[in-house]
Structure formats: structure tokens, C-alpha cells
């Protein structure tokens, strides 16, 4: 499925970081805070533009914009704004660290960040991680995950998927290999699933999945469900879905963050902040298709206050 990516946050046509810095200073000076002005500026600027505003703010006022925001704001609204002020690779590196720090590991977060991105994005995240924590991401993942799931994440961290070879002539042979590693034998050769799903380009793998359903009479997605379990299944499903239709994967993750009792605000903020400059327009379309209602309707019912206004401004487009 090749489609044009539709962001909801785009570069500002007449960008003036000096004026933006001044608006933000006024919003935080004196008694009370003008949250609407902060949302108005920061939700309508790209990550790169926000970094320039930060420099202008320091230059003009001799102050640290992020520190000022932290002292003026609180709660989930503050979390959302600070996420916006952090360059994306650094923000995602921090989110990975949070997922593996302390007791227990948040595998779903690791999958969302590591199993759905291209080589260049993964390399930026890996470098940011090393820069921030002075440890190799692979080593930290190795210590916190195990078995086939660990091997899958470490394969993703190699950032060496062949993104250029789309030769459909290879598809049938690869589909046969997948079939014989799973449905076509007793037990499952997880290493073979891993090798194929982490090595070849998305367009080629789409052809492989098409060929697979001719050989097997069921989809490779069904095979993942039947043959795998636990975290490995979660990771493989994420790769499979994002190869076929990445916005659909993120629409489902947004839904999962809001479904059931309570909202997973950390995931909700991360999904909105990390996709608004890439494909949030497409994600909104898929969300509507899957759940028969607009994404903003669910965000409105699950969040409140300035936090709600910020999320809505980011997905508005």
C-alpha cells in the first residue's frame, strides 16, 4: 500500500521564532499563565521550529524556555508540552529508557517504537540513546528482554533492512520459506520469521505476503497468530501491520491507549507527538474506518482541560 503521508503539523509559512519567543514569554510572565497562547504557538510549529524558538528565547530573555514551561505548567499538559519541546529521536530514546527502567518492561512501547520505523529513524534513536545514557541500546534491550523477542528487537536495532531491493521475482521463494518455517512444519522456526521480516524492504514484503496467501490459503497475519505467542507475536504483528498499512497500526495503538478503564496518557502523548509531523492525517482516516467515529471524538471524551486542547490542536491539521 503506497500512499502519500499527510502530517497535521507542518512548517509554518511565515516563521518568526523571535516573535514566537516573545509571545511565550508574555504568556508566562507575571500573575497566571496564558495556556491558550502556549498551545497556539507550540502546537502549530514543527519540532525543528520549536528548537529555534528555544534558542531565540534564550537569546532575547537570557532564560531557558523548557525550564520556564516546567515551572509554569503541570500534569499531563506539562508532559505533552515537554514532549513537543524535545527533539523526536531524544524523546523516543527517553521513552525506550522509561520502558526498560525499573521493575518490569513495557514491551508494547518497545514494539511501537522499534518495530515500525525505517533505518534512518532507528539510527537517530539509537544514537540519541547512546548520547543520553552512554550505553548501547542493544545492550540495554538485551538485559531487559529475552529469547526470540530479544533477538527481534536487536535485529531492528541493526538498522540494516534492505530498503532498495523491491524485486518481486524474489517474493514467491521468500513466501515458500516463511510457509515452511511455520505452517508447513511441526513447530515454528522463529529465527526464519525474524530473518525475513527484518531484512527485506516493505514493498518486497508486501509481495511476499500476497504470495503467501496463495500458497497457504490464509494470510501471513493469521499464521503469526497461530504460530507465535507472547511478546514475539506482538512484535511480529506490529511489523506485519506496519508493512501493510502503517497508519492502521498507529490507529489501533491510539485506540488501545484510550480503551477500557483509564487512559494510558503516556502512550497517547507519545503517539500524537511522534506522528503529527508524519502521517497523523492518514491515521485519522484509518481510525474513522476502523471505529466508525473520528479520533478527536475519543480524545475529547478521554481527556480534559488544556491537555485535551493541546492534543486536539496537534491532530487538527
Image: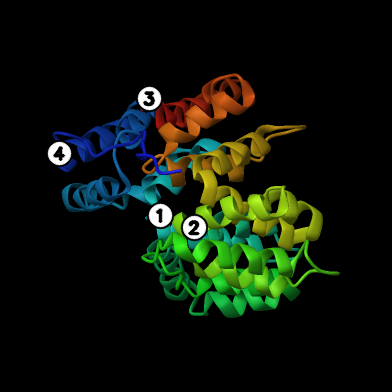
Instruction: Identify the image quadrant of residue 191.
Output: bottom right
Can see residue 146?
Answer: no
The residues tagged by marks 4 and 3 sit, at their Cα atoms, a distance apart of 19 Å
Label 2 to label 1: alpha-carbon separation = 6 Å
**Which residue corresponds to the image point at 63% horizontal and 24% vertical from the top-left?**
291
What is the distance, in whole Å, between disc 3 and disc 2 at their CAs? 26 Å
> Is the residue 278 above or below the residue 150 in the image?
above
Q: Which sits earlier in the primary sequence, circle 4 or circle 3?
A: 4
Q: Residue furthest right?
A: 186
Dot in front, 4 or 3: 4
The residue carrying mark 3 is: 36
Identify the residue position indicated by label 4 in the image: 16
Q: Which residue is mark 2?
A: 92
Name the residue: 47% across, 38% down.
73
Report if the CB atoms under discs 2 and 1 are less than 8 Å apart. yes
Of callouts 2 and 4, which one flags the residue occurring earlier in the amino acid sequence? 4
- The CA span between labels 1 and 3 is 23 Å
* Residue picked out by circle 1: 88
Residue at (44, 36) in percent of width and height: 280
**Which is in the foreground here, disc 4 or disc 1?**
1
> Against 64, is 255 above or below?
above
- Count neighbours of disc 1 (C-alpha within 10 A) and say few if under 14, some if 14 to 19, many if 20 or more: many
Residues at discs 4 and 3 in contact (Cβ within 8 Å): no
- The image quarter containing residue 163 is bottom left
Q: Secondary structure at mark 4?
A: loop
Residue 80 location (% of width, % of height): 48, 41
Image location of residue 294, percent across then percent down = 54, 21
Amino acid at each position: 500500500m503506497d500512499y502519500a503521508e499527510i502530517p497535521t503539523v507542518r512548517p509554518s509559512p511565515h516563521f518568526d521564532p523571535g516573535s514566537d519567543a516573545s509571545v511565550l514569554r508574555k504568556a508566562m510572565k507575571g500573575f497566571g499563565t496564558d495556556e491558550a497562547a502556549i498551545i497556539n504557538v507550540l502546537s502549530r510549529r514543527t519540532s525543528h521550529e520549536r528548537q529555534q524558538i528555544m534558542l531565540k528565547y534564550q537569546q532575547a530573555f537570557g532564560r531557558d524556555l523548557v525550564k520556564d514551561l516546567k515551572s509554569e505548567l503541570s500534569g499531563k499538559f506539562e508532559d505533552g508540552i515537554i514532549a513537543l519541546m524535545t527533539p523526536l529521536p531524544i524523546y523516543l530514546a527517553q521513552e525506550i529508557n522509561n520502558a526498560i527502567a525499573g521493575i518490569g518492561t513495557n514491551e508494547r512501547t518497545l514494539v511501537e517504537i522499534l518495530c515500525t520505523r525505517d533505518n534512518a529513524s532507528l539510527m537517530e534513536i539509537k544514537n540519541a540513546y547512546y548520547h543520553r545514557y552512554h550505553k548501547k541500546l542493544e545492550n540495554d534491550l538485551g538485559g531487559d528482554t529475552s529469547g526470540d523477542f530479544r533477538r527481534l528487537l536487536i535485529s531492528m536495532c541493526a538498522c540494516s533492512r534492505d530498503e532498495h531491493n523491491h524485486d518481486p521475482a524474489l517474493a514467491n521463494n521468500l513466501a515458500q520459506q516463511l510457509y515452511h518455517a511455520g505452517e508447513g512444519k511441526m513447530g515454528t522456526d522463529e529465527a526464519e520469521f525474524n530473518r525475513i521480516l527484518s531484512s527485506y524492504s516493505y514493498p518486497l514484503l508486501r509481495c511476499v505476503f500476497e504470495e503467501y496467501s496463495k500458497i497457504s490459503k490464509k494470510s501471513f497475519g493469521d499464521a503469526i497468530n497461530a504460530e507465535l505467542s507472547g511478546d514475539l507475536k506482538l512484535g511480529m504483528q506490529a511489523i506485519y501491520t506496519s508493512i501493510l498499512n502503517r497508519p492502521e497500526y498507529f490507529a489501533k495503538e491510539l485506540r488501545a491507549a484510550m480503551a477500557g478503564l483509564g487512559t494510558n496518557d503516556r502512550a497517547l502523548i507519545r503517539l500524537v507527538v511522534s506522528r503529527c509531523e508524519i502521517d497523523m492525517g492518514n491515521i485519522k482516516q484509518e481510525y474513522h474506518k476502523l471505529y466508525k467515529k473520528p479520533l478527536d471524538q475519543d480524545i475529547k471524551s478521554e481527556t480534559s482541560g488544556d491537555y485535551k486542547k493541546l492534543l486536539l490542536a496537534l491532530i487538527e491539521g
